[in-house]
């Protein structure tokens, strides 16, 4: 649980030295995590409703056509011409023949999403992909709009939030005939102090399991932990195929730049053999343009879950890529289609490695996409509980803080007095390297400040104040 508090321990104070050490770690984990938990809860709550929000934003581009559609190559050419110097990156199959076709074009790492009227070829709207509202919210949530540094901060906060939740569960776990009041439901008429203590404890008990799941299922997106996870999979031989979740904006930008360079190389090679294709906007199409018609026709017949993206080949002799980008990731299938429309191969979600499937389910539930509105509302309740934990912990700390100090519990023992706590810390440090690094830095800082800044050391609660008299 998030606790920047020194609330009285229920059922009488515990005197074990290592028990007080747990209180100490719980306090500092909460102190560091509180602003991040608030931020992630708010941005995550907004991102949960991405389908509903985007349905409203892009409603003007649905049901725009009333007659027969142009060929896909003409629609794609219109989008490419709207963004000078761009090439086709992705063609998104429309959910309805009457809807505007979304085309992703770009240059280098930058994509622009263009909405094209399928009947007239007119460009209805265009926006840089990373400037779309829900893409901005996604990066605010996972990276604080600060790239790898922001991702590292969020990941570190997530790791410490795990520590906070686990130590909170231990501290408040019922012992020796504890009553349900103050455990499963709060006592609302016993005074302010008990009210806030119960709100904090009861909320934490009810939402901890969901919060732990949201944190763990979100770690594969983190830059450092995600790379650590990929390296472990490579070493263990469990990595198979392309990863189906974001590896961070920096990594994704590098991947898009490589694919753009490869697509341009394909166009140049095609132009050398077919000089007539260098004239006009058709020169910027994927080679050859007629292949797009055949590939789109075949991709449509596969009936993958929408939205479905079709990407040009990136090397001679390689097929086009067709991938479902359904919000519910267990519905995501993919295929490879040759330039003549022949299906080279199809990969269903069930065909992927069990680790990829497990992460796919975890990400879908994390984003509220697995079970529709019920999933969204359940996640929202967990996030609201986390906000309530933050608020209640701040109130508890403010009411009980001592004068002239931060209010951290006194350290009555080094960690080695609890073998269970040592094992837990080592396990978390091994599983989450940024947690291990930040824990080591915290220990070093405490030791150094004790020598060079004794007053600050005392204010932080790392050393007991000498008794007067």
Image (spheres, rainbow, N blue to C red):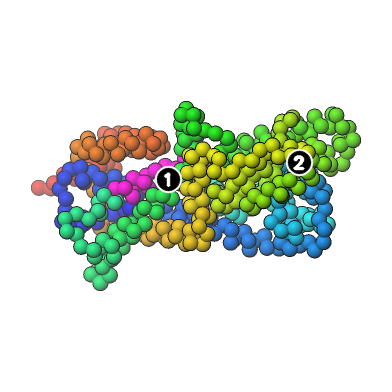
Q: Residue at x 63, y 63 (%)?
A: 56
Magenta span:
147-167
User: In the picture, residue 95 is in which quadrant?
Assistant: bottom right
Q: Residue at x 31, y 57 (%)?
A: 205
Count residues near mark 2 (Cα–Cα under 10 Å), then give few for <14, some for 14-19, many for 20+. some
Q: Check disc 1 and report the residue beneath it.
A: 216
Instruction: Look at the image and say whether residue 212 sits in the magenta stretch.
Output: no
Position of 399 compared to 145: left or right? left
For the question of whether residue 286 can be seen, the reply is no
| Residue placed furthest toward the bottom | 189
Q: Residue at x 79, y 45 (%)?
A: 293
Instruction: Look at the image and say whether residue 166 sits in the magenta stretch.
Output: yes
| SS assignment at label 1 | helix
On the image, the x and y values in percent for residue 60 come to: 71, 63
Count residues near mark 1 (Cα–Cα under 10 Å), then give few for <14, some for 14-19, many for 20+. some
Asked whether disc 2 touches disc 1, contact meaning CB atoms under 8 Å apart, the reply is no
Q: Check disc 2 and report the residue beneath it.
A: 341
For the question of whether residue 466 can be seen, the reply is yes
Image position of 3 with respect to 272: above or below: below
| Residue placed furthest toward the right | 276
Of label 2 and label 1, which has the lower sequence position?
A: 1
Position of 302 compared to 80: left or right? left
Q: Nearer the viewer, mark 2 or mark 1?
A: 2
On the image, the x and y values in percent for residue 172 come to: 25, 54
Q: Residue at x 35, y 53 (%)?
A: 208
| SS assignment at label 2 | loop
Marks 2 and 1, how far apart at CA: 41 Å
Q: Nearer the viewer, residue 412 or 13?
A: 13
User: In the picture, residue 38 is in which quadrant?
Assistant: bottom left
């Amino acid at each position: 649980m998030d606790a920047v508090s020194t609330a009285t321990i229920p059922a009488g104070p515990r005197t074990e030295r290592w028990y007080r050490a747990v209180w100490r770690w719980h306090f500092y984990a909460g102190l560091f995590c509180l602003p991040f938990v608030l931020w992630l809860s708010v941005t995550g709550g907004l991102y949960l409703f991405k389908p509903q929000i985007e349905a409203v934003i892009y409603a003007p581009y649905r049901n725009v056509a009333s007659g027969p559609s142009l060929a896909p190559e003409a629609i794609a050419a219109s989008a490419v011409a709207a963004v000078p110097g761009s090439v086709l990156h992705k063609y998104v199959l429309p959910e309805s023949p009457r809807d505007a076709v979304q085309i992703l074009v770009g240059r280098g790492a930058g994509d622009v999403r263009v909405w094209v009227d399928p009947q007239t070829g007119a460009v209805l709207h265009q926006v840089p992909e990373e400037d779309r509202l829900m893409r901005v919210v996604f990066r605010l949530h996972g990276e604080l709009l600060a790239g790898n540094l922001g991702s590292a901060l969020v990941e570190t906060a997530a790791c410490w939030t795990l520590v906070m939740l686990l130590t909170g569960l231990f501290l408040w776990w019922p012992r020796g005939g504890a009553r349900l009041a103050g455990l499963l439901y709060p006592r609302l008429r016993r005074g302010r102090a008990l009210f806030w203590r119960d709100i904090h404890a009861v909320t934490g008990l009810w939402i901890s399991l969901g919060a732990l799941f949201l944190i763990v299922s979100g770690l594969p997106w983190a830059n450092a932990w995600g790379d650590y996870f990929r390296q472990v999979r490579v070493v263990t031989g469990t990595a198979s195929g392309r990863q189906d979740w974001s590896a961070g904006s920096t990594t994704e930008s590098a991947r898009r730049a490589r694919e753009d360079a490869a697509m341009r190389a394909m166009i140049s090679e095609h132009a050398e053999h077919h000089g007539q294709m260098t004239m006009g906007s058709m020169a910027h199409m994927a080679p050859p343009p007629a292949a797009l018609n055949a590939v789109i026709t075949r991709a449509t017949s596969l009936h993958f879950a929408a939205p479905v993206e079709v990407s040009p080949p990136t090397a001679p002799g390689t097929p086009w890529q067709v991938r479902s980008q359904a919000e519910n990731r267990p519905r995501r299938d993919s295929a490879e289609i040759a330039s003549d429309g022949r299906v080279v191969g199809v990969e269903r979600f069930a065909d992927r490695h069990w680790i990829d499937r497990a992460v796919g389910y975890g990400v879908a539930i994390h984003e509220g996409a697995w079970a529709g509105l019920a999933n969204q509302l359940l996640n929202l309740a967990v996030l609201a509980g986390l906000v309530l934990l933050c608020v209640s912990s701040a109130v508890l700390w403010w009411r009980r803080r001592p004068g002239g100090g931060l209010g951290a519990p006194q350290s009555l023992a080094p960690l080695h007095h609890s073998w269970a706590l040592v094992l837990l810390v080592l396990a978390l440090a091994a599983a989450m390297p940024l947690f291990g690094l930040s824990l080591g830095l915290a220990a070093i800082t405490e030791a150094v400040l004790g020598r060079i800044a004794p007053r600050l050391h005392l204010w932080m609660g790392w050393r007991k104040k000498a008794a007067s008299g």
